[in-house]
Amino acid sequence: VGAYGGKAEIMSRIAPDGDVYQAGTLSGNPLAMAAGLATLNILKRENPYEALNGKCEALFTGLLKAAKKAGIPMTVNRMGSMGCLFFTPEIVTDFVTAQTGNQALFRQYYQEMLDRGVYLAPSPFETTFLSMAHTDEMIEETVHRAEKSFEVMGERI
């Protein structure tokens, strides 16, 4: 919700490069705190969590189905409105099992989706986060583009 900055001599002291740990951008800034509080009040009033979880379920169920159809080994870890794809048939429970994912397949997926206008985090260990700004149509289109991406990838296996 907030950010901060300063002179290089001060900012160079902030971790990880410096010796001063800083754990949040809200950290007492009155404007950022007001924005955060307003957001929490909206979330309390509108209670979007069930709908948001449904959006995430639709996205990751669609992606998993599309990968399976194309013969791409993939598993999904999902909680609430966030999830992560791993290009492995194995269940992923920790960093060691996450590393069993095929990173070359992830790079292909990343590039295929990018070529189709879907911008993903560039690391196979990053989580995807959905928000209420994501419409059902956007999710359907993302799954459709993933189907095309997986088809191309499946032809290479």
Image (cartoon, grey):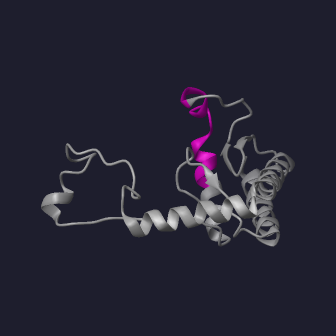
Q: Residue furthest left?
A: 9
Residue 104: give x, y in percent of width and height.
58, 46
Horizontal relation, residue 149 to residue 7: left or right: right
Residue 99: within the magenta? Answer: yes
Residue 138: give x, y in percent of width and height.
76, 70
Q: In this view of the protein, can residue 101 be seen by the observer?
A: yes
Magenta-highlighted stretch: main secondary structure?
helix
Horizontal relation, residue 26 to residue 84: left or right: left
Image position of 58 with respect to 4: above or below: above
Q: In this view of the protein, can residue 1 be seen by the observer?
A: no
The magenta stretch spans which residues? 95-108
Image position of 85 with respect to 138: above or below: above
Residue 100: within the magenta? Answer: yes
Image position of 73 with respect to 131: above or below: above
Residue 106: give x, y in percent of width and height.
61, 49
Horizontal relation, residue 115 to residue 138: left or right: left
Q: Looking at the image, which residue is at 66% across and 65% down?
A: 42
Q: Looking at the image, which residue is at 79% across and 61% down?
A: 143
